Image (cartoon, rainbow, N blue to C red):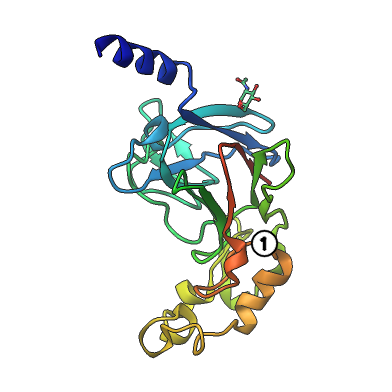
Amino acid sequence: MAFVHFFLLLLSCFGVDAVVFTLQNRCDYTVWPGIQASGGQPQLMQGGLELKPLQSRNLTAPKGWSGRFWGRSGCRFNVYGEGTCTTGDCGIGLYCNGAGGEPPASVAEFTLDSPVDFYDVSLLDGFNMPISIFPYDDSGVCPTVGCDTDLNQHCPTNLVVRGDRGEIVACKSACTAFQTPEYCCTGPFQNPNRCKPTRYSQIFKRACPSSYTYAFDDPLTTVTCRDSDYMIIFC
Ligand SMILES: *[C@@H]1O[C@H](CO)[C@@H](O)[C@H](O)[C@H]1NC(C)=O
């Protein structure tokens, strides 16, 4: 029995029972990815890291992991990892350790091994930078999803978030901006027959067809794969 346990431990050490997430920054600016594991799951990389342009990092998650990834921009952290970001800030510095990002932020979401892997890119919390999910998949059956368009360039004026120099740094979702049941699909609108795409969510949908743009968006924007590793690309 102890021998079997030793063997399983050995397997998990060699990553057989794990998933690799490759985070890659293709933006021409530094991105500080934030990672928030769902309740009870281990936080990867203490929930945060820095990626310079063209840099990538492989992270390993245990089988059955679930959680979300988002990019933070315009961060200023000291050597202790203390500081803040212009977008996607988690409020406690470089290492988010379970804290989520402040909207607006484009988010890549995963629920692994349940019993297949579910994943999507969500703009329900708005958009701050392009983000896409590419499964490492030789069979060609696992879809790529995400948003590689810079929605900040297409953001309706009343949803725009500006940085210190007046530049557009993010685009709010209509739900975040207006906080009404109609845009958030809450209260009497908590129903796919009542809550329809709005002219705001349609702008997001046109720019990013394979992303979630409102609460009852096309369920096909959540896709599945099996036993794959994943690349998450910023920009
Ligand atoms: C990162 O993980 C991918 C997928 O498993 C693999 O193909 C690649 O070689 C890894 N890169 C490094 C630097 O380990």
Q: How many marks?
A: 1
Q: Position of residue 75 (x, y in %)?
A: 49, 42
Residue at (51% x, 47% y) in the render: 116
The type of residue carrying mark 1 is Ser
In terms of depth relative to the viewer, which is nearer, 63 or 132? 63
Q: Quadrant of the N terminus?
A: top left
Q: Is residue 92 left or right of residue 195?
A: left
In terms of depth relative to the viewer, which is nearer, 1 or 143? 1
Q: Position of residue 131 (x, y in %)?
A: 63, 50
* Label 1: element kind: loop
Q: Quadrant of residue 211?
A: bottom right
Q: Position of residue 54 (x, y in %)?
A: 69, 31
Please determine whether, in this image, residue 215 is positioned above or below residue 223: below
Of all residues, the one furthest to the left in this rendering is 2
Image quadrant of ligand 1 equals top right
Residue at (49% x, 64% y) in the render: 125
Q: Is residue 90 left or right of residue 19?
A: left
Of all residues, the one furthest to the front in this rendering is 1
In terms of depth relative to the viewer, which is nearer, 97 or 224? 224
* Label 1 crowd bin: few (<14), some (14–19), many (20+), radius 10 Å: many
Residue at (56% x, 63% y) in the render: 123
Residue at (45% x, 27% y) in the render: 17
Residue picked out by circle 1:
210
Q: Is residue 60 left or right of residue 231?
A: left
Q: Position of residue 144 (x, y in %)?
A: 69, 50
